[in-house]
Image: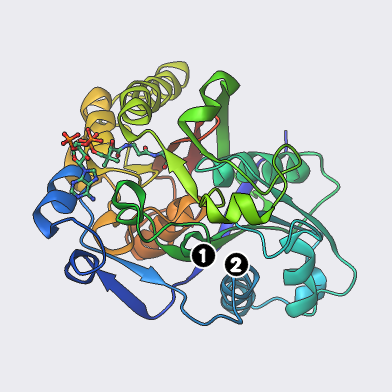
Amino acid sequence: MIKAAITAVSAYLPEYVLTNKELETMVDTTDEWITSRSGIKERRILRDKDKATAFMATEAAKSLLKKRNIAATELDLIIVATVTPDYQYPATANIVGDAIGAGDVWGFDVQAACSSFIYALETGARYIESGRYKKVMVIGADKMSSIIDYTDRNTCVLFGDGAGAVLLEPSTDETGIIDCKMYSDGSGRKSLFQKAGGSLHPSTAETVANREHFVTMDGQSVFKIAVIKMADVAEEMMQRNKLSSEDVAWLVPHQANKRIIDATAHRMGISTDKVMLNIQRYGNTTSATLPLCLYEWESQLKKGDNLILTTFGAGFTWGAIYIKWSY
Ligand code: UT7
């Protein structure tokens, strides 16, 4: 069977750094509270009003092409994982394709909240495995600051903006994306959602006045289930692939809360030096957390390393992917 291999990784982060100290001047919070409850110290914010998710995705895509030394026209498919598309339609993938000069390459967006990237990665991998597609770009990008209420201390301290991209190509050896398990449970939808702006509650003066176009989260109930499900699925991925904790070179967890990550690593029996953790610098960038980790740790990865990627997000959605690193 053809396997999909990640053959290059890239990222884009906006320059502006929003620190916990600055947040202290915006809402009733403290650096101590944010750090101890979430592990976050600062996050990046795309402040330019004319730029949004497609811009960050495009920057990541351009540097990915450069790195792999291929032309945009060589791409067969672009998948963008995002909860903050530039528009309801067209898809952000279409805008990125145009911006990088990929001609009339097809593409689409995938939305599964904080699990968007692994849903998109699994989707992209399947296209490669079909044998019909040779180069699939999967991008995770979110301008979370566009849907965050900076008067709500429950959410505004947690999120940041950013983008990461990977290129999928057919593997030439035994490495690549080996296994994947995804889950969702829509009964949890009201614990973390955006009330208005969809077809159920279209935008009106009232929905705007009621601040219903922002992230609404019952943090505690999301936390309780996230801690269990992310650890469950990571452990399941190890068990079904007969991987011991020694076999796992890296845990690549969604960066929502350091305590959730610690619990997952603990359940897997993995020490902290094998956990990719950059939440302190970027916060929760939703669809971008996993490719941002891969990008930052790329130079430490070795061919054949076993990586477990895992996420939990709104929906609820969660899952894990097992990758044998290809370069
Ligand atoms: O990526 C998608 C999935 N999202 C997640 O996984 C997020 C999951 N949830 C969490 O990470 C945590 O629940 C939070 C970091 C959001 C909150 O941590 P917590 O330990 O669950 O705190 P809490 O919600 O139980 O709040 C404890 C207290 C409350 O005050 P009272 O009611 O005890 O007086 C909150 O009002 O902390 C208060 N609080 C804050 N205080 C200072 C909430 N936000 C803040 C804040 N600064 N920013």
**Vertical side of 267 occupied by 103: above or below:** below
Camera-nearest residue between 34 and 236 = 34
Which amino acid is tagged 2? Answer: Thr
Which amino acid is tagged 1? Answer: Ala
Q: At which x and y percent is residue 255?
A: 35, 47
User: Which secondary structure, mark 2?
Assistant: helix
Q: Residue at x 86, y 65 (%)?
A: 105
Camera-nearest residue between 219 and 290 = 219
Q: Which of the image's four quarters has the N terminus?
A: top right
Residue 16, by quadrant, is: bottom left
Circles 2 and 1: CB atoms closer than 8 Å: yes
**Closer to the camera: disc 2 or disc 1?**
2
Q: Which label is found at residue 163?
A: 1
Q: Is mark 2 within 8 Å of ligand 1?
A: no
Q: Which label is found at residue 53?
A: 2
**Vertical side of 291 occupied by 233: above or below:** above
Q: At which x and y percent is residue 298?
A: 40, 62
Q: Residue at x 86, y 47 (%)?
A: 132
Identify the residue at the far right of this view.
104
Whether residue 24 appears in this view of the structure is yes
Tally the marks: 2
**Vertical side of 324 occupied by 243: above or below:** above
Whether residue 82 appears in this view of the structure is no
Density class for disc 1 (Cα within 10 Å; few <14, some 14-19, many ≥20) is many
Tell me: 35 left or right of 83: left
Identify the residue at the far left of this view.
32
Report, in whole angstroms, how far the alpha carbon at label 2 lies from the one at label 1.
8 Å
Mark 2 / mark 1, whichever is N-terminal: 2
**Vertical side of 70 occupied by 222: above or below:** above
Q: At which x and y percent is residue 294?
A: 42, 56
Residue 312, by quadrant, is: top left
User: Which secondary structure, mark 1?
Assistant: strand
